[in-house]
Image: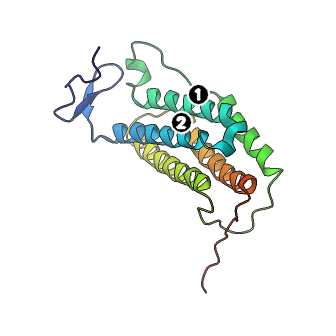
Amino acid sequence: MKIYTKTGDKGTTALVGGRRVSKGALKIESYGTVDELNSWIGLIRDQPVNEPRRDVLKEIQDRLFTIGADLASEPEELRKKPIPSLFDEDITLLEKEMDKMDTELSPLRAFVLPGGHQSVSYAHLGRTVCRRAERLVIRLAEEEEVNPMVVKYLNRLSDYLFVLSRKMTQELGSEEITWKPRL
């Protein structure tokens, strides 16, 4: 099977279920941004500092594929076959990982400027793409039914990526630069 089908040459794509929609549709923008986030998570996972977290980051990538499948599908009542699901345990995993990292970090008393090390910057970029995906999915949910677990997972994942960026800063011996507003 060839990778190119030419079916999208006129600016449409097929949802899981077959219905064709504009590639500019909010639904496509939503799962496309989740796909972009998945690529950032892959880059974050590939950083040597994240060797101990590779399995967790791979699990996150798998969940993002689950979210993409959910967003790319017709509403549940129109689906012809089942798709993967998110579970409470997926969110609990992120919370447990954050709690574990938090016990080894100094308390946060100010906003942190992104950066300090290239690997940390990747985590911050992932976090901001995650927030964008979350905003798009929330907008989509205002137009059509969206699994509420998707919004919850993306919200928790952006928190996880922030805590991860702080943990990476610590492990890399980089400076965590806090924002000092001009008054």
The quadrant the N terminus occupies is top left
Question: Which residue is rendered at x = 47% and y = 50% of the image?
Answer: 132
The quadrant the C terminus occupies is bottom right
The answer to whether 38 is drawn above or below residue 104 in the figure is: above
Query: Is 79 in front, or is 101?
Result: 101
Question: Which residue is rendered at x = 36% and y = 42% of the image?
Answer: 29
The Cα atoms of the two marked residues, 2 and 1, are separated by 8 Å
Report which residue position mark 1 lands on: 86
Q: Residue furthest left?
A: 10
Residue 17 locus on image (x, y percent): 34, 19
Question: Which residue is rendered at x = 25% and y = 24% of the image?
Answer: 4
Report which residue position mark 2 lands on: 150
Q: Residue furthest right?
A: 103
Rendering quarter of residue 6:
top left
Query: Is 115 in front, or is 136?
Result: 115
Look at the image and tell me whether residue 40 can be seen. Answer: yes
Question: Which residue is rendered at x = 80% and y = 43% of the image?
Answer: 100
Rendering quarter of residue 33:
top left
Who comes first in sequence, dot 2 or dot 1?
1
- Disc tally is 2
Which element type, helix, strand or loop, lies under badge 1?
A: loop
